[in-house]
Image (spheres, grey):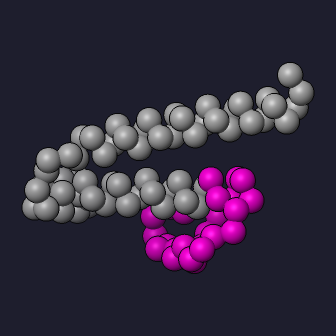
Amino acid sequence: MDATERATMIKSELHRCLQGARSSVLSKLDGLGEHSLRRPMTPTGTNLLGVVKHLGMLEYGYLGQVFGRQHMFAIRRVWPPTDDPFRRG
């Protein structure tokens, strides 16, 4: 097996795992009403729909950058750029 075939095989496996993770998350939400999807579940106001949006943006941003894909739209930063995005002000 040459390097190109191996890379193709790894890419296929990554895609299969990613599809499985997506399906798993979405299956947990299947059948829930809009109120349940949007209802805040934590003291910070996080809801299930927000978790799905967060996962999608991570996938879009991280995998797009890793594989050198051009983004079709800009990702808006929700915090000011710092060395540590998790630092509290």
Whole-percent x and y of residue 20? 44, 35
Is 81 within the magenta? yes
The answer to whether residue 17 is left or right of residue 69 is: left
In the depicted structure, whether residue 2 falls above or below residue 30: above
Whole-percent x and y of residue 51? 33, 54
The answer to whether residue 35 is left or right of residue 87 is: left
The answer to whether residue 23 is left or right of residue 29 is: right
Q: Residue at x 87, y 32 (%)?
A: 3
Q: Residue at x 78, y 35 (%)?
A: 7
Whole-percent x and y of residue 66? 70, 53
Start-end of magenta stretch: 63-89
Q: Residue at x 57, y 77 (%)?
A: 74
Q: Residue at x 25, y 54 (%)?
A: 48
In the depicted structure, whether residue 40 falls above or below residue 3: below
Visible in this render: residue 36? Answer: yes
Is 78 within the magenta? yes
Q: Main secondary structure of the magenta part?
A: loop
How many discs appear?
0
**For residue 4, which quarter of the picture?**
top right
